[in-house]
Amino acid sequence: MSIPYAAHQPYLKTLKPAAQSRLARLEPAARYLRHRPYLLLLPLLLFFLVPHYHKSPRVVIILAANEGGGVQRWKTPQEWSVERSSIANKREYAEQHGYILSIKDTALKRRYSHEWREGWEKADILKQTMRQYPDAEWFWWLDLHTFIMEPQISLEEYLFNNLEKRTYRDLSYHNPLHIPVDSPYVDVEHSPVDLVLAQDCGGFNLGSFLVRRSEWTELLLDVWWDPVFYEQMHMTWEHKEQDCLETLYRTQPWIRERVGFVPLRAINSFPPGACAEQKDDPQYFYNEKDRDFLVNMAGCNFGDRSCWNEYEHYRNLQKQLRKSRRWSWLPGF
């Protein structure tokens, strides 16, 4: 007499009751959901309604603007147009690379009861923005009359990933103010770059610069914004916070240690009309063939220049250049 196959496989007899037992335990839940089908939608609702985790952006772009209108006079239609174009340019760039765009109002504000402190707001706004975005590492200040010409290039690719090689740590490359190059107690070899600056024909250019969050940066901003400097020098320093930073760099070795300079055309190319006394010097002016990263129309609201005309020119030029999809590094970069 042959023995059934199942008799040789006792595990088959033990698995089946276990499976039936599990199904039996699920039956009450199935009956519950059968009468309440809307509960099946809860996972979908949670997926769409609960915010998902995103890595905090590394970069915050600070755009100085006055969206509320004129301060001392009405804005012209051309001024409104330039402002809208500038904001759209930075917003597109920030969204493309996962950065934050923070638009800061630079209307005249009475910081102290006895005086206007117009033009010194950069350090104060930087401090506020760092508190507002505590997880961000880099903060890129841009004046309103700047325009990013190569938005397809991220700051990581362009600058941060090779910061030490993209910057020079003293003024031997370019020194329009004739600041002493050598300074005692300065150790740049063992100090990171926390402030990235460019120089134009008149010295430090603060229309486009970058700062990294650090204890050094916090101390620099505190000293830079110190009202003692303003009280003593605001009638002497024509360029306000720019002259203040130049003086700090000239006199304080600890500040020199973490400043990195880049060529002006790396982050601050000028259009014709700026730096008029150096109009034949190519190191200052935007070069279409080299595809400079950003143009800064500094001073376009003075003399016979027109901010709107210049802005429209570079906005249209950018559209043409983006179609060619060609880009090369700057000379000296």
Image: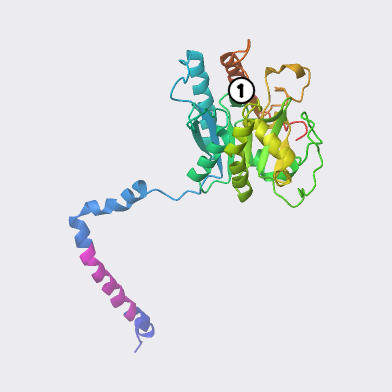
- Image position of 136 with respect to 273: above or below: below
The quadrant in which the C terminus is found is top right
Q: Residue at x 70, y 44 (%)?
A: 255
Q: Residue at x 72, y 50 (%)?
A: 191
Q: What element carries label 1?
A: helix
Amino acid type at image mark 1: Gln
The quadrant in which the N terminus is found is bottom left
User: Does residue 210 appear left or right of residue 101 in this picture?
Assistant: right
Residue 19 appears anywhere in the view: yes
How crowded pointer 1 is (Cα within 10 Å; few <14, some 14-19, many 20+) is rated as some
Q: Where is residue 76 in the image (x, y as percent from the top left)?
A: 48, 13
- Image position of 303 with respect to 168: above or below: above
Q: Position of residue 164 (x, y in %)?
A: 73, 45
Residue sitting nearer the eye, 177 or 273: 177
The magenta-colored residue range is 14-29
User: Does residue 76 appear left or right of residue 172 in this picture?
Assistant: left
- What residue is disc 1 on? 318
Q: Which residue is drawn at 34% across and 47% down?
A: 49
Mainly helix, strand or loop, the magenta region?
A: helix
Residue 208 appears anywhere in the view: no
Q: Position of residue 129 (x, y in %)?
A: 51, 40
**Residue farthest along the left direction in this orientation:** 35
Task: Report the coloring of the rendering.
Answer: rainbow
**Residue farthest along the top direction in this orientation:** 304
How many discs appear? 1
Q: Is residue 132 magenta?
A: no
Residue sitting nearer the eye, 21 or 300: 300
Q: Position of residue 2 (x, y in %)?
A: 36, 87
**Residue farthest along the bottom direction in this orientation:** 1
Q: In which quarter of the image is residue 250?
A: top right
